[in-house]
Every structure is written in structure tokens, then in C-alpha cells.
Image (cartoon, rainbow, N blue to C red):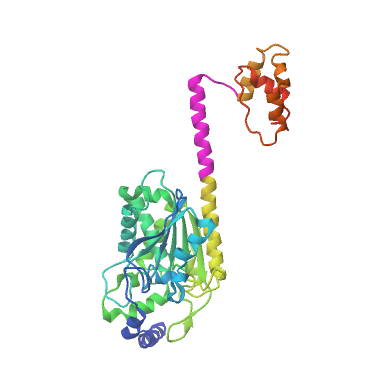
Amino acid sequence: MERIKNEESTQKARRAFTLRSVARRDTTTRSDGGGGKGPIGLTTLFEPSVPGIADLIFVHGLNGGSYSTWTQDDDPDKFWPAKWLPQDEAFQDARIHTFGYNSSWAQESVLNIQDFASSLLLSLKDCPKIPREEWAPPLIFVGHSMGGLVVKKAFLLSKQKQDFASISQRVNSVYFLATPHHGSDMAEVLARVFAMAGERPFVKELTRNSPTIQAINNEFPEQADGIRLFSFFETKPMSYGIGKSLVVEKQMAQLNYANETTDYLDANHRDVARFSSKLDSSYIKIRNSLAKTIESLRRGRHVARQRRVDDQRQIVEAFLGVTGSPETTLSEIARSYLDGSLSWFLEKPTYSQWTNNPNSSTLWVQVSIWQRLEADEISPKQR
């Protein structure tokens, strides 16, 4: 009975997904990023004028593009990674990139998810816009659908190869938008439809619990324990010729890890990654979460900088033989002056003008025992 149902489903799908109709939906990839699917490889969309706090990388999915996946109605003004985020104060110090690869389902291909992941790693490693030093900023990935699997595989490969070790160490967060972590039944239909039209390994790999997906899921939990994961799932069905359904069901779009945050988006599979306006509820959720992650990186950088300053101060103090706090040192100096020393200075016009002028800033006095006198005589208000 199950076999009959599958065959009927496949026959209906074949009628809906003819190669001609698929080809019509598969727009040509353009290298200029305007219209079409967008360029192949890594494209930098925004580079801040200040030192970057993070590199934000967008990775599209099956039959998507570095431009089209993130753009509603093919409107350049709705290409939100390039148009909206750079205008947002919360992202002014973040470098923004988009990565493209040929995942067209209308063309025969020998490529698989590992090929796409390797290309992503090489693009990150060789990109002149992305620093390669140890202090280089963290990486934040946003993957739509299969793009999330490409990111996961790229992360695992970076853990295995020394050439990419600096990349794996810099991955801070990954955002999954309707990613089929456990596969998709829709991919099973597509794989059967295209079975007689040539190989497309990456389509087969998207089927429910495929060997590729199982291998990724076996390694990823342990390796990704130190990074922050965000999984968003679709809630609206898509029409695909024989009816409507979710492309990636809720349970397939969640990892169920302790370091994973999950949430739903009021959108279908495509519209979880592209939005009609900045007021779109799905955009607001993703934007706010990304902004919060970047703000946490800023706070972390401030703490790290202060820690370095403290470490350097301790080294200098050790070299000079300084012990104790500045207040303790000042107390020791104070014992060396006599009662009434320099009290006459408090009556000087220069001192009076300095204390009475609200615009005064610094009064420079070249007297060796001034510190204690100033501490005793100048009120907190005057300071």
C-alpha cells in the first residue's frame, strides 16, 4: 500500500514538475548581482569604516542564489543584507557578505553538499576583505534551507583540515532558516522526478535521513558545542502544483541541542529569507536576534580589551616594583609632608579661578607632594 501511494505521489509530482516548468522557474545566474540569481562565490556587500566586529555571511539553499534568495519580488531595494542592514545602526561595524553556488535543480550536476561546503571554506580563506590574523573578528552565518547544511558541513571540514583551523575557531553563531536538518519529504519527490533526467547528488542528499545528513548529524553536536545556534522554521505552506504543504516541517527544522534557540516565522519556505518590508514580523525577529548577537560581541571585545590593559599594567608594575593600589602609594607619600605644607597655595588667585570657573578642566602643578594636599583639601564637588 505504501509503495502504491509513493508511486501515485511521484506520478503527480512528475506532472507538476516537468523539466520545462522547472527551467522557466530557474532564472539565469548573473555575475553582477543585479537581477537573476546573483554571482557565484563570495561577494562583500558592505564594509564598515571602522574595525569590523564580525563577518556576517549569507548562504542560500536549493535552487537559490546569492541575490535572489534574499530579495523579495526581485526588487533591488528589498535585497535586505545589502540595503537594510548597512543602514541599521546595529550593524554599522559588521562586514556583510553573500555566498553563491550553482544549486540549480534544472541542470544535471556532479556536485554535492561537501563540494559546496569546500567552496565556501576556500572563498572565506582567500577573500581579501576578511582578515586572516588570529585576532580576526568572529564569523556569523545565516543559511537558508540547504544553505544551513552547507554551513554545517563547512564547519566540520574546517575542524578536520589545518588550513581552515582559523575559520573553525572564529565561528560564533549560525542562523538556520528552514534548514532540513533531518531531510525533507519534498526532496524525495524531486529526486524521483529528476531520476531520469540526470544526476543531481545534492538533491538526493536532502531526502529524509539520507546518509549525508546522518553523517553531518553524527559529528555536528559535539563539534558545535561551543557555538550559538538559532533555528527558525516555516509555518505557511507553499503551492507546488499538486497541492500545498510545508517544504520543511517543524520537527525537521530543529536540532534539539542545548545550545540551540528555536522560533517560528510567519512565512512559507521562501519567504523566511526574503521580506516585503522592514515591518515584516519575520524580518524583525531575525534582525533583532542578529543585532543582539553582534551586541554581545561588542561587550565581549570591551571586556577583552580591559583585560589586556590590566595585564599590561600588572607587567609594568612588576617591572617597576610597584605594589598595592594607587591609593596605598598615595598614603605612603603623604607621610613625608609637614602639617601646613603648601596651604598657602589654596589662597592663590590661580587656584581660586580654577575652582570657581565651571569650564576649567586641568590645573597643572609641579610640586612633588601635591597629591596628598589635593586629596585632602579639594572637595569631591570641585574634583
Q: Nearer the viewer, residue 82 or 168?
A: 82
Q: Position of residue 78 (x, y in %)?
A: 47, 71
Q: Position of residue 132 (x, y in %)?
A: 36, 47
| 145, above or below 341, in the image | below
Left/right of residue 355 with respect to residue 61 in the rendered view: right
Q: Residue at x 64, y 21 (%)?
A: 371
Q: Nearer the viewer, residue 56 or 210?
A: 56
Left/right of residue 150 with respect to residue 362 in the rendered view: left
The secondary structure that most of the magenta stretch takes on is helix
Q: Is residue 3 magenta?
A: no
User: Which residue is most to the front?
Assistant: 349
Q: Is residue 317 magenta?
A: yes
Q: Residue at x 48, y 83 (%)?
A: 244
Q: Is residue 297 visible?
A: yes
| 143, above or below 333, in the image | below
Q: Position of residue 188 (x, y in %)?
A: 38, 76
| 98, above or below 49, in the image | below
Quarter of the image where the C terminus is located: top right
Quarter of the image where the N terminus is located: bottom left
| 330, above or below 177, in the image | above
Q: Nearer the viewer, residue 182 or 4?
A: 182
Left/right of residue 152 with respect to residue 40 in the rendered view: right
Q: Is residue 258 visible?
A: no
Q: Residue at x 67, y 36 (%)?
A: 359
Q: Position of residue 379 (x, y in %)?
A: 73, 28
The stretch of residues the image draws in magenta is 301-325
How many labels were placed on the picture?
0
Q: Residue at x 64, y 24 (%)?
A: 327
